Every structure is written in structure tokens, then in C-alpha cells.
Image (cartoon, rainbow, N blue to C red):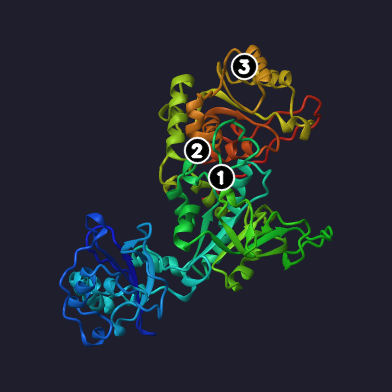
Amino acid sequence: MITVYWNFKGDVQLTSHFIANKGSKRLDAEILLRERPTPGGRRPVRPPLKPSRPCQKRLRAPSAERATRASGKALPRAPQTRGPPSPLANGRPKGGRSRRVQANPARGAAPGLPERGASQMAAGGGRGLGALLLLLLLLGVTAAAQPSPEAFQAGLDTPFSSPPAAASAALHRRYLLYDVNPPEGFNLRRDVYIRIASLIKTLSKREAWVLVLPPWGRLYHWQSPDIHQVQIPWFEFFDVPSLNKNIPVIEYEQFLAESGGPFIEQIYVLQSYAEGWKEGTWEEKIDERPCIDPPTYSVDRHKYYRGWFWGYEETRGLKLACLSVQGSASVIAPLLLNTSSRSVMLDRAENLLHDHYAGKEYWDTRRSMVFAKHLRVVGDMFRTKYLNSTDERDRTQYTEDWTKMKVKLGTAVGGPYLGVHLRRKDFIWGHRNDVPSIQGAVKKITSLMKTHKLERVFVATDAVADEIEELNGLLPGMVRFEPSQEEVKLYRDGGIAVIDQWICAHASYFIGTSVSTFSFRIHEEREILGFDPKMTYNRFCGDEERTCEQPTHWKIVY
């Protein structure tokens, strides 16, 4: 079968894309023929090549064509025996657009084209015919580039246009996507990534799986007005090549390019068991069950599932089911390995637990989550300018290749300032017993600065304007990273949070907020840099809290 595109724009050209399949002896070729119209809409008549015998039944004699033209009569249309209607109307292409028709090379002219068009294909296609012959000669060396039958499923109706090697690799790998409960914040989502990375490692022992990084957006704490904060790729916050040194990952846009369209073949909505679990009888299990809560997806007229999908409205799912799950991330691996779907999404992935929390696998993934370099540079410049802090003096030299970075705890000294994360807003009522008042926080900060002989304190907080003004009045040495409007647009709220964490991670002493994942991630960053645990694992206590238990030290494992 030869697929022909006919368009009267530009010079005569021939381009082709073909896939050879020796097993089925199939040839798909796409030929694009273009001819420039003359002024007034008339096309030049070139002397036709001598047609082959099969074509003589289909082509009119040039003299008859000229006689018909001279008489002023309209040329007769070719019989519409096969293929779509002719793309020509009164000698001109409609809208200048290409139309696709099917041609049988053994029958001569392409059915569906007017006879005059077929004549011009023969007349102007000298170079095209030669190129087609060359195309046929190349078939023997391109058989390896064939697409698998899966490439023509929903959303995969055209072969990949990437180079043969990349296309071959993409054809054989499967895609895992995931999302998290919408209210969850930036740093809890980072923790879920570690869990899913463990699942990818389990799957990769059997098959070629790649993790599709879920675009960032629509988070509770990202409240800066007039800033587009959806469909944000991971490279804006993290160094993606570093992630790839741990597990294979791609951005969502690359998934769309590789898979051929915005289709996710299978969506699994994860949920707990409706009956709960009995204390003392914990077991890991997973079952397909009716959805406990109504899924946040709707079914369109094509029976596709529509949903949030990270702000990509054109994305849709083909199948959806709810899974009750109880256990670590890898408990779902057997199900994924047995499904025929090439792309699978796990919604509400926070329901999966860590496979090996705080073990080597956990820390390998955590160490691979290197902040984007442009954000680290901004943080380092701020440290140098306002906090008299540099990596050389602080003994916090950073190795770009995380696999080669192994620092002994207690080696890092840190900058001459106190690092503080003071969580407010929802924590004031959600964790009122664990969070101090502004006056209580100032009292603790002042005491620590005196004990460690520090004159400056860097504060990362989500406090409202009135509380920040109060802090400024009570802490003369307070320093904050206050970005301009242009910087907020450039780095987004997520990037500003990363810069805050990076600066806190380099302080000589750090104190955070109880059960805050923002503080937890700073603990881990300081563990990677090599700080003494006593200078890291500290938290504020509530004003009325009697037993103020400090955070647990999870020692890094190499």
C-alpha cells in the first residue's frame, strides 16, 4: 500500500517515511508530491513520461487534454471508484490543505485523483519515481525499525518518529504514572516519589519500565496570584539527569511524544480496605474492589475517562478500576506485570508505603533528588551576600554526581547563622499543641542564638504579613529570602521553597516544626551534607507542651 499526499504548494518534492516488515511483507510509504501553481491558478503542463502498460488504461492522451482545454470545456472528473473525494475544486486545491488518498501501484493513477492530476503525477514525478525506487532498495536495512502491533492501539495510531534506536527502545518499554491526593503538599509528594521509585526498581527486574514524572501544580501552599503554576516539569525544581542515575524517568511531555497521544491505557485508583485492618493482624494484600469514594473522573461521549491529569485537559484514560491496597509499594508489582496495558497510572499513590524506609535503597533515591542547579546557585549567592556563608568556609562542598558523594557525619560546619523553619497557617489549628506562638518561637530562637554565639537567623515561614512584622520587631538579626515579583514568576512558589530549604540546610544549627515534611526534607539534606545530627534534628515545642520529643535521627546509608 502506498499512501499519497497531494498538495499544490512549493516545488516538486518527494519525502517518505516507511516501515518494512519482512515477516508480513508489508510496506507502508507516505509520498508527498507538491507542485507550484502558476499565476491565475493555471498549472504548467509538462510533457508526460511514457506511461507503463498498466497506466495506459488510466491516462488520457496529452493531445486530447490540450484539445479539451482549448475548447474551454471543463475537464471530466475521474471516476470515484475508490478513495476519498478529489482535493481539487475547479483546478485549485481547497484551502491549500493536503488530502490523503489510497493508491495501488499496480493500477497506475491514484483512484480519487482527477485524470489531469494523475497526468501531472507522471509528468512531474520523474525525480519522485527515482526516489521511490531508491526507497524500495533501502527496505532490507530498515526492517528492524518496524513498529509493534501495540503501536497502533488507541493513542498509538502512528509509528514513532524518533530515530530507530530510540524508537525501538520506546516500543518495548512500559510507562508508570502516578498522582497524589490533591491537598498533599510539595514535600509529601517528594516522599511518595521515593516509594514509587522503589516500585520501579522491583518492576525493572522483570521488564523495562520507566517512571513518568507527574507535572507539578495546583498545590495548597502555592498561592502567589497571577502566576501560572500548573503543568510544571520536574526540571524546574530538580536535576532530572541525577534522578535518571537511580531509576529511568521521563517528563510527561516526553511520554506524550513517545506514546503517540494523550492516552493512559489503565488507571488504578488506590484506596484502603473498607473494613480496615485488625490490630495485630497486619498483612500485605491488594484486591480490586468497588470504589469507596466516587472517583474524581468523568466519562465522556467516547467512553474515555476525563480528569485533572496535572492540568492536561486533553489527556484521557481508557480503563479505570479501584484497588484496595494494604502494604508497601512493591505489593502492586505482580498486578502491573500481569496487565497488558502499556501505560498504567496509580492515582492516590500515597496509599502505598515505603518498601525499605531509611535503608540503602531509600537513601539512594533520596540522594538522587538533587535540587535544580539554578535554584542552588540562587541560594548560594544569597548565603554569601547576606549570611557570610560559603561552601569552603562551611565545609559543605557539594559533588554534582551524587553517586560519588559520601560525607562522614560531623564533617560539615555550616554558615554562621541559625536556620529556622516556622510553620504557621494550617498548623496553628491542625497541630496547635506542637506549634508555639510567635512569642514562644522568638524566645526559643533568642536562646539558641545566645548558646551558639550566632548573630543572624534565617527564617523560612509561611506566616502572614502581621506575624512577619512581629518577628522582625522581636528579632533584629532576622534574615529572609524575599523574592521580587519577577523572581516569583521565574522560580514559582515551588522554587522559592527549594531556595529556603537549601539555605536552611547550610546553617550551623537548624530547628524546625514538628511533623512538618518541609522540616523533614531539610533534615535529610543536612544528613547528606554531613552535619552532626545534634545540630540538625531539633524542633520547636508548643507553649503548653510538657513532653517535647525531638525528631528521630534516620542515619544515612551508603
Question: Left or right of 499: which side holds 77?
Answer: left
Residue that mark 2 sits on: 529
Vertical placement of 53 versus 96: above or below? below
- Image position, residue 39 (x, y; %): 22, 54
Please tell me which residue is depicted at 67% across the width and 23% down the height of the picture: 464
Q: Label 3 is placed on what type of residue? A: Lys
Q: Nearer the viewer, residue 443 or 344?
A: 344
- Image position, residue 393 (x, y; %): 43, 26
- Please report whichever mark, 2 or 3, sits nearer to the chain's N-terminal start: 3
Please tell me which residue is depicted at 58% across the width and 43% down the height of the picture: 217
- Image position, residue 149 (x, y; %): 47, 76
Question: Left or right of 280: which side holds 372?
Answer: left
- CA–CA distance in space, label 1 to label 3: 41 Å
Q: Nearer the viewer, residue 377 or 121?
A: 121
Residue that mark 1 sits on: 216
- Please report whichever mark, 2 or 1, sits nearer to the chain's N-terminal start: 1
Vertical placement of 222 versus 270: above or below? above
Please tell me which residue is depicted at 20% across the width and 79% down the height of the picture: 61
Question: Left or right of 73: which side holds 443?
Answer: right
Quarter residue 129 falls in: bottom left
Q: Nearer the viewer, residue 48 or 216?
A: 48
- CA–CA distance in space, label 2 to label 3: 25 Å
Q: Pick the quarter of the image with the N terminus.
A: bottom left
Vertical placement of 388 versus 235: above or below? above
- Image position, residue 398 (x, y; %): 43, 38
**Secondary element type, mark 1:** loop
**Secondary element type, mark 3:** helix
Residue that mark 3 sits on: 450
